Image (cartoon, coloured by chain):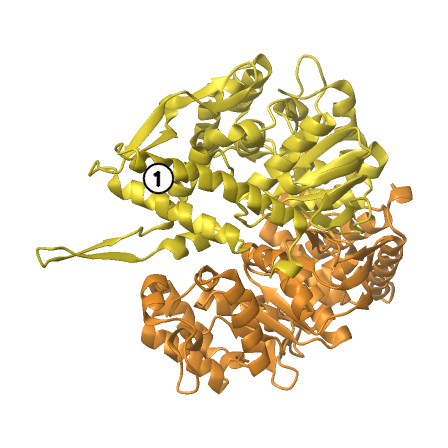
Chain colours: A orange, B yellow
Amino acid sequence: MSEFTSKVDKEARQRAAEVLKKRFLSLIEQINKGEPLVMEIPKRTLTNTVYDEKRKLLLLGESKLKRSFLDLNEAKRFMQTTLMGSIIYDALVNDEYPTIRDLYYRGKHSIVLKAPNGRTYEENTWDEQKESDSVIVDIEVFTSLLREEMLILSKEKGKVVGDMRLRSGNDVIDLSKMGHGAYSIEPTPDLIDFVEVNAEFVLVVEKDAVFQQLHRAGFWKKYKCILITSAGQPDRATRRFLRRLRDELKLPVYILTDADPYGWYIYSVFRIGSISLSYESERLATPDAKFLGVSMGDIFGTNKKKPYLSEKERNSFIIKAKDFDVKRALEIRNYSWFKTKSWQDEINLFLQKKSKLEIEAMASKGLKFLAFQYIPDKIEKGDYIS
Amino acid sequence: MSEFTSKVDKEARQRAAEVLKKRFLSLIEQINKGEPLVMEIPKRTLTNTVYDEKRKLLLLGESKLKRSFLDLNEAKRFMQTTLMGSIIYDALVNDEYPTIRDLYYRGKHSIVLKAPNGRTYEENTWDEQKESDSVIVDIEVFTSLLREEMLILSKEKGKVVGDMRLRSGNDVIDLSKMGHGAYSIEPTPDLIDFVEVNAEFVLVVEKDAVFQQLHRAGFWKKYKCILITSAGQPDRATRRFLRRLRDELKLPVYILTDADPYGWYIYSVFRIGSISLSYESERLATPDAKFLGVSMGDIFGTNKKKPYLSEKERNSFIIKAKDFDVKRALEIRNYSWFKTKSWQDEINLFLQKKSKLEIEAMASKGLKFLAFQYIPDKIEKGDYIS
């Protein structure tokens, strides 16, 4: 296989294999010293999740759990962790690119023990993928290696176009020469090199179809931007790619979604990440991403600005909020990172109007309106929420 | 906008606008001649859907419906069709790229009539998108223009890599130089030119993550193939792109999915299309696409071949079929295009074993096994179902 895989990958797997080996060898050392076998892993619980106000990130706290091999309650999880560690290590040294689904299958079997008393005991390593997935996360926090660094691949929806050249694998790809198509981001965006970038900001659109429209209309050419779509809820690679654009190229990031609590949620995932996976925030989140719209103020106007929709358009375009929209809005209003005045105003206006709007309704006023008036106007005026 | 859009698009919209204009002008001619206003549209009903054995396509039959403007039952639909026709025409001449969702919004409003008797009548053009979508299909069959030819865009999941160069918009893109990423197919694949292709077959994998694995392992380099993923159920553009590879480059097409009725359904969509949209088959379907696997024979063996899984692997990997799997299998068994002996054997073996298998289970035996043994072995031996 190796003749066809990239040098970048070979180096990455060597690095990861080293770290993994070293971390798990520390367990062998415990045995050699005659110590009880214990794995120390940062706790991934809500109480050990801290919102770092300054860095605007969800982070794991200091608490660690000790997993003892000799504790009956923890022995199975201990076994699962070392089993998964060895499967991932084998995959690394054998030029494999497993997915988390593969890893589940690779480890799934029954362990049979014929005890000295003559009885036979049988135990499955794991039964469902959520068990093995959770073990993978343990290994990520135990080794400080993200799954992507261990060459674990996943499906990837994110696309990008813009005036930039990047190096991926053995190739340099010009993202300004994608025709009507786009570049699909790889599942391991940390292995990308940004070779040359000529852009002033990044615009992320939730919906793939809107991305297609803006791309085709030449939006990114006219406004010198990197145009990205997450095609719905963003996956890890798209989030990491965006974060790297922000960090390494210092580009401001604007996010465009439907005007509804689900759109805010997508924004929130880009900006902060999720509570259940807060250990990743530090590398996957883009804390200063700005919510460009569509905002309730764009629909209804505020005391500071006129709405972008006429009353007649509002009547035709607005969708009545469902109960689950209201429920989600109430939840989101309580998140620490939505406690700013601008967000509270936005959410309260939604709760008052109980209305939502799709970005397509804005596009239906004309692509020229969306691409060459609404979006650039809002960016120029700094009319975003953060 | 026009300075940023491609010449290809400009020509395409000119062509479509001409056809649309001509077709709808025929209605004006009827009025000028004093004839009753009637639109003749091929019927899109199950009874007017024919499976063409020879061409292996689902096609619309000869039946046409006549939609009369002066028939109370048809006047609204008549109005909707001309309304949508004019919206699409406007979009074409104004350099717009609407989506079907946009078109729904663009046409959505209330028509108010103040009658001479002093009463006011109000009627919505349409209330839900399924109404406007259905009108779009009417216009497609009325004009013989597919929506893509009218520059109606949509979200697009399909990705491709391989040793080929294609022209899209103003660019020539080298699909062998995508690094670890991939090329996202445009929503209007008929506007693509195949510039140069160096490949012996096309492999379509249902799952994006498996595509990532095969791509990364260099599968398409080693076996000279074009590698495509539909990322689940294929969309129109991916189907059309595949069909063009088949027709214009005469490449054999193999499809790789999970071993379950949903996988067969995906294969069926590629090969035939769907009954509800049979008017598209003629251009979107790839009738001689071959189902490479995973087949029940690969799992359990047949009297002609050994299984690819050991009994132990089967025990770990197989998933018990659910009731809806069995239900779908029974439906599929009745489709005309699954009436071949090899398909009937496959479906009957499934119904007997009531077991399914994910492609990831094969990958868990090692990516080398999947990429460099299982897939090439099966292609070489002609071990597929069709």
Task: Estimate how packed mark 1 is, as few (under 14), some (14 to 19) or many (20 or more) residues with alpha carbons within 10 Å.
Answer: some
The answer to whether any part of residue A14 appears in the image is yes
Which amino acid is tagged 1? Ile
Q: Is residue A326 above or below residue A109?
A: below
Q: In which quadrant will I find the C terminus of chain B?
A: top right
Asked where in the image residue A12 lies, by quadrant, the reply is bottom right
Q: Is residue A363 left or right of residue A127?
A: left
Which residue occupies the foreground of this view, B195 or A260?
Answer: B195
Q: Is residue A75 left or right of residue B113?
A: right
The answer to whether any part of residue A115 appears in the image is no
Residue beneath the point at 37% across and 63% down: A324
Question: Which residue matches tag 1?
Answer: B28
Asked where in the image residue A109 lies, by quadrant, the reply is top right
Q: In which quadrant will I find the N terminus of chain B?
A: bottom right
Give coordinates of residue B84: x percent, y percent. Answer: 39, 47
Q: Is residue B260 left or right of residue A79?
A: left
Question: Mark 1 — on which chain does it sit?
Answer: B
Q: Secondary structure at mark 1?
A: helix
Give coordinates of residue B341: x percent, y percent. Answer: 57, 12
Residue beneath the point at 67% across and 79% down: A62
Q: Is residue A152 left or right of residue A10?
A: left
Number of labels in the image equals 1
Give coordinates of residue A144: x percent, y percent. Answer: 76, 67
Give coordinates of residue B308: x percent, y percent. Answer: 72, 26
Q: Is residue A140 above or below residue B289?
A: below
